[in-house]
Image: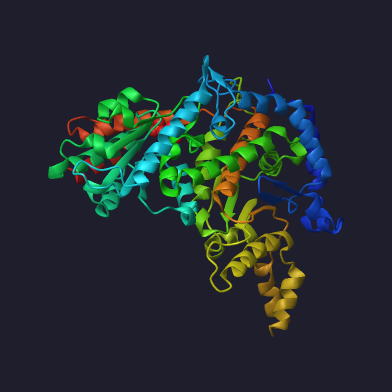
C-alpha cells in the first residue's frame, strides 16, 4: 500500500514540476529576474536567509505550500506547541518550545502544569550558578570550585558543548567548563590531567542516568575524587546531576538537593534549553542563558505563525526535501564561516540524523521515498582546502548551507572581510562554475598552446549549478544563536511532518547498545567463547590476545 506522502496529489505534481525545473540552470533563473535575491530571502528572529541560489521558482514554493496544507502541517505544528503526545511510539509530547517561553503559559502533561516545573528548575539553576560565580560552592576540603566538568553524551553533550564554545565571547570566566563524553578512557584521562580534584565539580548529565558512557565516566571521576586523601567522603560536594532518574542519581551518591530535574517530555537532542543547559548557564551566566532562550522563542513564534511560504524553518525543510527526494542528493553540508560555530555541524548531525533517520512512517509502513540524508561540514575557510573540491567538481550533488555573522567579535586587520569574501566566493563559484570555453581561453591567455589547452581544459571545468543557502546574522550573540538552533530544530520537525515520520524517538540506537553489552561480556571474560559471525569472532580473539593478563 503506498504511503500517505507518495499518494499525495501535490507530491505527484512536484515530480512533474521537477522535470520542468531540471531543464533550467541557476544562472538562467537569475537572468530571468533582477529581483530574485529579494524574492527568495526572508528575515526572522534576527536571522536573514538568502535562498535564491536554489533550483526553485515561485511555483516550487506554491506547490510546497499546497503540500503542507494537504499533509496537515498547521495541525501538526499546533500539536507540537500544545504538547500533544506527538512522539507516539513513546507516548510523549516534545515540549522543548515550552522551555523557552518565558510567559510560562500553562501546559498540562498528564494533568500536571509543567510551566511550574520549568520555572522552579530555572530558579534552582539560577541559585546554583550565582553561588558558583560568587565562590560560594566549595569542595570537600573547603576550597572554592573553579572547574566544572560536564559528563554526558549525545544530547547531554553536543548542544551544551557547542553553545559554550559558540558563546566564548560571553563567558564569565568565573568557573571553567570542560566536557567529557566518550567511553574511550583517553578523554577523561586527558581532561583530568589539567584539573585538580579539590576545586573540580562534576555534572553528571544524563536524562536516563543509564547511559553506559556517562555512568562509567562518572564512576571514573568519582574514583579520582575519592583517591584524594581529603576528599574520600566528599562525593556529594563534587557531584551534581541533571536527570529524570532521581533514584539512580541518588544511588550514585549525589545529594537530592543537587539533582536538577529533567523530564520525559524533552527529547535528549532538544534539551539544551532545559537543565541540561546548566554548563551553558555556568559559562555565560543566567542572563545570557535567558537571552539564548529568548532568541529561540522568537524563532518559535515565527515558526508557529508564519505561512509555509514565509516560514524560514519550513523553507529550509522544503529545500532539503526538494534535493533529497527529487534530485537524489544524499548529503547536506553545513559550513559556518565563524570559528565559534565550528561544532555546529556535529551538533546538527545528532539533531537531524537521529531525529529523521527513520525507515517507516507514523503508521509503521515502510517508506517508499528517502528520509534523512547525511549531514556533515566544518568551519570555513578550512574546508576550502580540504573537501570543497567535492562541491565544485565531484560527481555527488551536495547542497550547502553557508552561515556567517556580518560583524565579528574579533576584528583583526582585514580578516573578517577576507573570511566573508571566501564564503561568498564559494557560493558564487558553485552557482556559476566555469565552462570549457572559459577554461580553454584562460589557458591560452596564460601562454599554453592550443593543444595543451585542449588537453588541460576539461580538468578545469566546473559545472556550477550547485545550490546553496546563505544564513546571516548581525553578530553571533546568545539571542541570534538561540534563533539559529531553533531554526534547525523546526526545520527537522517540518521535514518529519512531510515525510510523515516520528522525529522524537530513536529506536535504531538500541540494538547496537544490546550487542555492545553482550560483546563486552565476551571481551572481559577470558573463558567465554563467542558465537557471532566469523569476522566479529576473529576481532574478539585478536582483542583478547592483546589484552591477556
Ligand atoms: O543513545 C542515544 C541517546 O539516547 C540520545 O538520544 C541521547 O541524547 C543520548 O543517548 C544520551 O542519553 P542520556 O541523556 O539519557 O544519557
Q: Is residue 75 visible?
A: yes
Q: Is residue 371 left or right of residue 350?
A: right
Residue located farthest toward the top when viewing the structure as drawn: 111
Q: Quadrant of residue 53?
A: bottom right
In front: 535, or 103? 103
Displayed-image quarter of ligand 1:
top left
Q: Indicate the position of residue 363 as horizontal and vertical percent values.
A: 61, 19
**The N terminus lies in quadrant:** top right
**50 relative to 187 in the view: left or right:** right
Count of numbered labels shown in the rendering:
0
* Residue, far right: 32
Instruction: Tell me residue 356's x, y (percent).
Output: 57, 34
Q: Nearer the viewer, residue 23 or 375?
A: 375
Front-lying residue, 60 or 131: 131
Residue placed furthest toward the bottom: 447
Q: Residue at x 77, y 39 (%)?
A: 309
Figure quadrant of the C terminus: top left
Where 376 sits versus 269, above or below? below
Can residue 537 be seen in the rendering of this structure? no
Task: Specify the quadrant of the image occupied by residue 423.
Answer: bottom right
| Residue 531 left/right relative to 44 | left
How far from the left and from the top, in percent, is residue 147?
31, 49
In this view, 128 is above or below 56? above
Amino acid at each position: 500500500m503506498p504511503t500517505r506522502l507518495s499518494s499525495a496529489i501535490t507530491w505527484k505534481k512536484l515530480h512533474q514540476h521537477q522535470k520542468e525545473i531540471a531543464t533550467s540552470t541557476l544562472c538562467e533563473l537569475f537572468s530571468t529576474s533582477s529581483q530574485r535575491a529579494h524574492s527568495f530571502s526572508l528575515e526572522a528572529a534576527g536571522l536573514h536567509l538568502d535562498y535564491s541560489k536554489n533550483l526553485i521558482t515561485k511555483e516550487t514554493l506554491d506547490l510546497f505550500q499546497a503540500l503542507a496544507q494537504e499533509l496537515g502541517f498547521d495541525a501538526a505544528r499546533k500539536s507540537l506547541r500544545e504538547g500533544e503526545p506527538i512522539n507516539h511510539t513513546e507516548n510523549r509530547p516534545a515540549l522543548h518550545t515550552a522551555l523557552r517561553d518565558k510567559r510560562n503559559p500553562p501546559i498540562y502533561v498528564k494533568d500536571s502544569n509543567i510551566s511550574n516545573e520549568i520555572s522552579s528548575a530555572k530558579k534552582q539553576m539560577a541559585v546554583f550558578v550565582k553561588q558558583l560565580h560568587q565562590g560560594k560552592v566549595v569542595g570537600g576540603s573547603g576550597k572554592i570550585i573553579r572547574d566544572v566538568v560536564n559528563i554526558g553524551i549525545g544530547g547531554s553533550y553536543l548542544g551544551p558543548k557547542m553553545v559554550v564554545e559558540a558563546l566564548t565571547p560571553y563567558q564569565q570566566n568565573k568557573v571553567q567548563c570542560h566536557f567529557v563524553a566518550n567511553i574511550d578512557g583517553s578523554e577523561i584521562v586527558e581532561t583530568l590531567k589539567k584539573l585538580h580534584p579539590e576545586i573540580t565539580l562534576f555534572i553528571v548529565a544524563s536524562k536516563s542516568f543509564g547511559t553506559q558512557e556517562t555512568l562509567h565516566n562518572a564512576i571514573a571521576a568519582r574514583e579520582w575524587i575519592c583517591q584524594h586523601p581529603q576528599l574520600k567522603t566528599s562525593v556529594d560536594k563534587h557531584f551534581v546531576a541533571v536527570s529524570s532518574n532521581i533514584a539512580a542519581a541518588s544511588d550514585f551518591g549525589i545529594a537530592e538537593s543537587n539533582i536538577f530535574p529533567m523530564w520525559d517530555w524533552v527529547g535528549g537532542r532538544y534539551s539544551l534549553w532545559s537543565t541540561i543547559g546548566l554548563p551553558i548557564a555556568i559559562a555565560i551566566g543566567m542572563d545570557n542563558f535567558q537571552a539564548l532562550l529568548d532568541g529561540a522563542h522568537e524563532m518559535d513564534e515565527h515558526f508557529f505563525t508564519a505561512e509555509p511560504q514565509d516560514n524560514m524553518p519550513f523553507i529550509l525543510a522544503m529545500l532539503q526535501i526538494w534535493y533529497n527526494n527529487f534530485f537524489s542528493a544524499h548529503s547536506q553540508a553545513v559550513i559556518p564561516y565563524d570559528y565559534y560555530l565550528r561544532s555546529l555541524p556535529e551538533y546538527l548531525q545528532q539533531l537531524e540524523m537521529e531525529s529523521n533517520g527513520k525507515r517507516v512512517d507514523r503508521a509503521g509502513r515502510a517508506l517508499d521515498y528517502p528520509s534523512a540524508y547525511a549531514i556533515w561540514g566544518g568551519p570555513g575557510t578550512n574546508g576550502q582546502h580540504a573537501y570543497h573540491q567535492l562541491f565544485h567538481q565531484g560527481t555527488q550533488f551536495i547542497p550547502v548551507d553557508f552561515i556567517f555573522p556580518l560583524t565579528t567579535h574579533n576584528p583583526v586587520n582585514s580578516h573578517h572581510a577576507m573570511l566573508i569574501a571566501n564564503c561568498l566566493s564559494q557560493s558564487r563559484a558553485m552557482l556559476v562554475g566555469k565552462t570549457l570555453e572559459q577554461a580553454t581561453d584562460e589557458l591560452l591567455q596564460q601562454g599554453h598552446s592550443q593543444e595543451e589547452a585542449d588537453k588541460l581544459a576539461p580538468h578545469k571545468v566546473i559545472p556550477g549549478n550547485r545550490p546553496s543557502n546563505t544564513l546571516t546574522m548581525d553578530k553571533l550573540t546568545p539571542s541570534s544563536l538561540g534563533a539559529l538552533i531553533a531554526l534547525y530544530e523546526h526545520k527537522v520537525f517540518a521535514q518529519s511532518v512531510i515525510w510523515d515520520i516520528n522525529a522524537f524517538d530513536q529506536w535504531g540506537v538500541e540494538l547496537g547498545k544490546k550487542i555492545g553489552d553482550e560483546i563486552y561480556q565476551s571481551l572481559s571474560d577470558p573463558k567465554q567463547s563467542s558465537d557471532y559471525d566469523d569476522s566479529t569472532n576473529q576481532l574478539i580473539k585478536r582483542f583478547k590476545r592483546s589484552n591477556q593478563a
